Amino acid sequence: DVKIYNRVDCGAYCTSLLNQFTIEVLDNGMNVVSSQAYDDTAPAMIHLQMGNVEGSYVRISVPDGYLCLAEVEVYGNKLYDFPTFSPTNIPTTVPSLSPKPNLALHRPAQQSSIAGGAGADLAVDGNTNGNFGEGSVTHTSGGSNWWMVDLQVIASIRDVKIYNRVDCGAYCTSLLNQFTIEVLDNGMNVVSSQAYDDTAPAMIHLQMGNVEGSYVRISVPDGYLCLAEVEVFGTKLYDFPTFSPTSIPTTVPSLSPKPNLALNKPAQQSSTGSNAGADLAVDGNTNGMFNDGSVTHTLGGDNWWMVDLQAIATIRDVKIYNRINCGSQCTSLLNQFVIEVLDYDMQIVSSHAHDDTAGAIIHLQMGNVEGSYIRISVSDKYLVLAEVEVYGTKLYDS
């Protein structure tokens, strides 16, 4: 049973704050195993029978208004202690667990846009404090937004904990009432997707089903995306192959370097605005903040950008880094575009129309087409590019 002692100093107004609430029992994995709804005139002390349910946490929630509690007493029989991650000072019958590593901690992270200087890395800094003013909560600009962490390993992902922003009450936490969480493999293909649609608490605990992957992405359909911390738990299966030999021998073979065929190659565009020339998209700098000086910009109207690879190459894939400093207003400029591969004689050999909500990075598979030029074009708007990377195999020089 559970006894809840109510606030009493302001009479019926105070006690009525507990006229409607839900009490839940959760197990050691934070899964709800019992739930009771209370809907009655609340006295100074509420005594609830819980039915000898087995659990480790008790949670009380109200749908609206303040939650005031003088005391909560929980009565029952202790069955056993939690297993611990390190040996205890006094011997127990409960075995120690292997440490539970957070695979996302301090790993590279990115997001669709940045507001208030609150970048993606704040959700993997090990600080779960959800008060935005304390400086450890991410924040995007409005619109359709996403956040992603690169685990830098191939892992079996068991569960994910998402710590919400809490400093502005229900408004803040409600920003995560609807979101999608995806696991992507080493090739950036989605291998698992879950839609969350519920009243979001301060911490959301999701079971991922031991799916194998390398990236975790969280996206919201509209509004700001604010994350205090994202923890990813599971088992590391093996490291990514590296492009150069490691200092310590591993069982993972090194890869041949993956050259960016467009890097520092001649580029041109249909027009230039704000002195932001075509070469800024092949300078090796993927920074999408326009004022940092590495993003192209055309004038209005129909526009195009093109790079001369100075080689005849088999083109496997292209990565386009978008402008991000003005949120969806910026990224949406690439919602619709056409990318073409041209041969040495400037004849089009491949054409692909992109028509989708553009994120900070657009990764396109080109099907190993042979060509020498890449051209990107838009209709009736600015063309703005942070960087264009072209990957494939050089067959011979032009």
Image (spheres, rainbow, N blue to C red):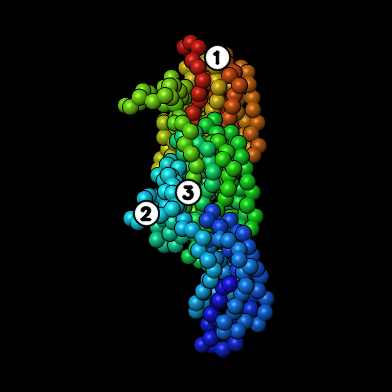
For mark 2, what is the residue?
91
Task: Give the residue displayed 60% in from the left and 63% down from the top.
Answer: 53
Report the mark closest to the observer, 2 or 1.
2
Q: Identify the amino acid type marked 3.
A: Glu
Relative to 264, does residue 233 appear above or below in the rendering? below
What residue sits right under mark 3 in the picture? 231
Could you give the CA–CA distance between mark 2 and mark 3, rounded to whole angstroms? 31 Å
Q: Earlier in the sequence, mark 2 or mark 1?
A: 2
* In the foreground, 9 or 376: 9
Helix, strand or loop status at disc 1: loop
Q: Label 1, label 3: how many angstroms apart (C-alpha)?
A: 49 Å
The residue closer to the viewer here, 88 or 381, is: 88
Counting from the top left corner in percent of width and height, residue 379 is at 63, 36
At label 2, the amino acid type is: Pro
Is residue 380 in view? no
Q: Taking 168 as reference, is 289 above or below it?
A: above
Secondary structure type for disc 2: loop
Q: Amino acid at mark 1?
A: Tyr
**Residue 256 seen anywhere in this rendered image of the structure:** yes
Q: Position of residue 272 (x, y in %)?
A: 49, 36
Q: Which residue sits furthest left?
A: 247
Asked if labels 3 and 2 touch by Cβ distance under 8 angstroms, the answer is: no
How would you rate the neighbour count of disc 3 (Cα within 10 Å): few for under 14, some for 14-19, many for 20 or more? many
Frontmost residue, 60 versus 247 = 60
Q: Which residue is mark 1?
A: 344
N-terminal of the pair, mark 1 or mark 3, is 3
Dot 3: element? strand
Front label number (2 vs 3): 2
Q: Are marks 1 and 3 in contact (CB under 8 Å)?
A: no
